[in-house]
Image (spheres, rainbow, N blue to C red):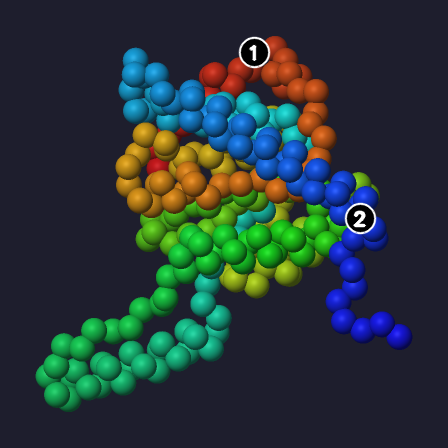
Amino acid sequence: MKVGRPPKYKDEESRKESRRIQNRETQRKCRLKKKLKEVTKSDSLSPNEKDNRYKKELIRFLSRYEFNFFFTGTIDPDFMEKRRLKLINEDIRQLNQTLETDISYQTEKKVGIQSLRKYTEKYIQFLINKQLITGCFVVFELDKSYKYHIHILFKTTDNIRGFENYSEYHWLMGISLTNPIESEMDKINKITYCVKQLNPSSRKIRNINLLDNWFFEGSFETKKYHERELSNSFSIESIVFYSN
């Protein structure tokens, strides 16, 4: 009886084929990021125009994929952590009142983008291993208090039922919400929402982090997409981005 971890590949040929697929995906991602950097190099464009051009090119690229679910995941300390902070801060309040001191209250530990990305990658790999998804696009975002959350566009495998409940139940970092993408226009709107904080002209560290950490994972076929499929009057160039 064999024990331990089962072999990842059946044979050497399946290992090589897996590597070839991974290499193609890596090269595709590198080509996309290189192209997006190129579209922002023109000196004749203002920073805002460069940002919008970058986002529209990304929308144009991602619109070729048949995403069918939109996921949002937030970070929230668990119940015990919140209770612990509440007790500590109550002790600090009493000390400040009794001794007339000014000890600072403890706040929630903010989760950094690298920690969130590492968890997100494991979460996605879990869904892939369960054969629930074939591909996804992931972007990180900051709220008004500069806390991170994520948006994911999923392409599920065929005939999967109850994906919304399953994806939300297994997101353990906080609250999550999964909604189906109803149409091609809805997909464009979701992609536009995802990329709204990507501003390559910015030199702020928090904006650079958002730009450097978006990614797409898995393998799925592109759809033969043309903007006329959405409507005769629609154009990606007509998309307007509003300030955050």
Q: Between residues 202 and 21, which one lies in front from this camera angle? A: 21
Q: Where's residue 227, x and y in %? A: 61, 16
The residue that disc 2 covers is: 12
Q: CA distance from mark 1 to mark 2?
A: 52 Å
Q: Which residue is mark 1?
A: 233
Amino acid bearing label 1: Ser
**What is the total number of numbered labels drawn onto the structure image?**
2
Image location of residue 81, percent across then percent down: 43, 75
Please tell me in which quadrant of the rendered image residue 98 appears.
bottom left
Q: Is residue 25 left or right of residue 3?
A: left
Across and down, in percent, residue 224 comes to 70, 20
Q: Residue at x 54, y 48 (%)?
A: 72
- Residue farthest along the left direction in this orientation: 100
Using the image, determine if residue 241 lies above or below residue 25: above
Left or right: residue 8 versus residue 199 is right
| Mark 2, secondary structure of its residue | helix
Residue at x 76%, y 50% (from the top left corner):
131
- List the single residue furthest toward the right: 1
Is residue 180 in view from this perspective? Answer: no
Quadrant of the image for the C terminus?
top left
